[in-house]
Image: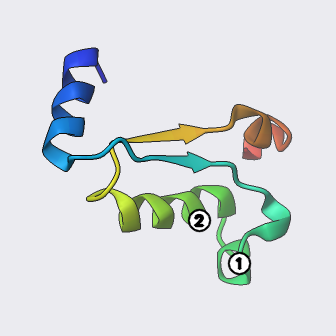
Amino acid sequence: MKRQELADTIKSHRNFLCVGLDTDLQKVPQKFLKEKYPLFAFNKEIIDATRDHCVAYKPNVAFYEAYGSKG
């Protein structure tokens, strides 16, 4: 996303909400653990539920790097 796109999104949403995706597999609800990619499935549900309200997402890379290629 370019700077102007972000500014336009902030203006249209009338907020600065950024959702942090700091996913700890130990805290992911059980229903996602049966998925092939549980972190992806969990984060996708968060994104789908919040996309109309927030302007950005910030994944914390350290949480995903800890899981190697599965992160």
Disc 2/disc 1 C-alpha distance (Å): 8 Å
Q: Is residue 66 above or below residue 31?
A: above
Residue 55 picture location, percent across and down: 33, 42
Q: Position of residue 57 (x, y in %)?
A: 47, 42
Q: How many neighbours does mark 2 have within 10 angstroms: few (below 14), some (14-19), or many (20 or more)? A: some
Image quarter where the C terminus lies is top right
Quick one: SS at disc 1?
Answer: loop
Quarter-wise, where is residue 5 in the image?
Answer: top left
Residue 17 position within the rendered picture, expressed as x and y whole percent measured from the top left = 40, 47
Give the farthest residue toward the bottom. Answer: 31
Q: Secondary structure at mark 2?
A: helix
Which quarter of the picture shows residue 23?
bottom right
Q: Relative to 9, say whether 54 is above or below.
A: below
Which residue matches tag 1? 29
Who's the residue at 83% across and 44% down the image?
A: 67
Q: Earlier in the sequence, mark 2 or mark 1?
A: 1
Is 18 on the left or on the right of 63, as rendered?
left
| Residue beneath the point at 66% across and 83% down | 31
Residue 28 appears at what percent x and percent y? 73, 70
Residue found at x 30% / y 58%: 53
Residue position for label 2? 42
The residue shown at (60%, 39%) is 59
Labels 2 and 1 touching (C-beta < 8 A) = yes
Checking the image for residue 49, the label placed there is: none
Amino acid beneath label 1: Pro
